[in-house]
Image (spheres, helix red, strand yellow):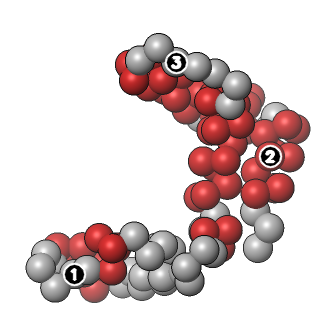
Amino acid sequence: MLDNFSPHLTTKKDTRVGDWAAADNVEFACTSTNSCWLNRIEAQFTALRCFALDGTHHASHKERGSMIRRYVSRRNKNKHAADDRLREVVNGANVA
């Protein structure tokens, strides 16, 4: 699932991604403009913002990166995957 970000739509200059997709039987599906809600991964970014970035003011990119890494590490543990609040945020973002 791809949004309309121009590098996603351009394969004429660099065919590596298109060649990989053809070899591995992958079909690209481009979403319409302003329809990121169709892309299921977007809900995970909503959760990342909610749990790691909202209400914070990081002094540096390094500090923000550290918060994101901590969230991803915690998110990848099975215990957090069953978290009701996480499920609520992700399901709220997955409106499709």
Give the residue type at disc 3.
Answer: His
Q: CA distance from mark 2 to mark 1?
A: 35 Å
Q: Nearer the viewer, residue 95 or 58?
A: 58
Evaluate if marks 3 and 1 touch, with contact meaning CB atoms under 8 Å apart.
no
Residue 14 in view: yes
Q: From mark 3 to mark 2, how far is it between C-alphas?
A: 23 Å
Q: Is residue 61 left or right of residue 53?
A: left
Report crowding for label 2: few under 14, some 14 to 19, many 20 or more residues within 10 A (C-alpha).
some
Residue topped by disc 1: 11
Residue at position x 16%, y 85% in the image? 12
Q: Quadrant of residue 94?
A: bottom right
Q: Which residue is mark 3?
A: 58
Task: Give the mark, 3 or 1, whose residue is nearer the N terminus.
Answer: 1
Residue type pointed to by label 1: Thr
Residue 65 is situated, as x and y percent measured from the top left of the image, at 44, 25
Q: Quadrant of the C terminus?
A: bottom right
The residue sitting at 59% across, 34% down in the picture is 76
Q: Residues within 10 Å of mark 1 (few under 14, many from 20)?
A: few
Q: Amino acid at mark 2?
A: Val
Q: Is 84 displayed left or right of 70 in the figure?
A: right
